[in-house]
Amino acid sequence: MSKSLKSQVSIEFIALVSFLLLLLILSVYSSSSQLFHQIFIRRYNKAEILCKYLQDEINLALKAGDGYRRSFFLPLSLEGSNYEIILDNYTLYIKWGNYQTSCFVPIESINGKIKKGWNKIKVLKNEIYIE
């Protein structure tokens, strides 16, 4: 086998390996972006459910009126992601990372802070308190 033929075979082998490596990298990138999208959709859906749940808790307290008391539990994370709950100007926000979802509540503010874990909601003198 001549020297030029050996070098041609080597170059073709390196080109083939490089092409296969490129295909592998592209398939891993494609799979990971789909996975990240699925994780985002799951977190977003959980945040929407959480927002509606809190909205229902506040609406129920307002409709029940004075003397209403109830305990409820909020998850410690959204699909493994830290989150925060903010009530501002009749809007309840669930924020995680660079994302958020929101829902309307018929009250501008509450006394206390909604937190992860166990919360106690009560109504005294038509005011909502969260402990």
Image: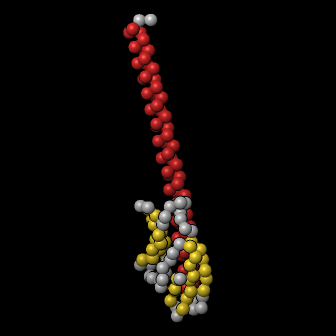
Vertical relation: 53 (above or below) 23? below
User: In this view of the protein, can residue 3 be seen by the observer?
Assistant: yes
Q: Quadrant of residue 71?
A: bottom right
Residue 22, placed above or below residue 3: below
User: Up-down: is 54 above or below 112?
Assistant: above
Is residue 82 toward the left or the right of residue 70 in the image? left
Residue visible at 47% across and 72% down in the picture:
85
Quarter of the image containing the N terminus? Answer: top left
Provide residue 25's location: percent of width, then percent of height. Answer: 46, 36
The furthest residue to the bottom: 125
Residue shown at 56% from the left, 83% from the top: 121
Quarter residue 90 falls in = bottom left
Is residue 56 something one can see in this rendering?
no
Q: Position of residue 14 (x, y in %)?
A: 43, 22
**Residue 123 percent location from the top left of the image:** 55, 88
Looking at the picture, the colour scheme in use is secondary structure
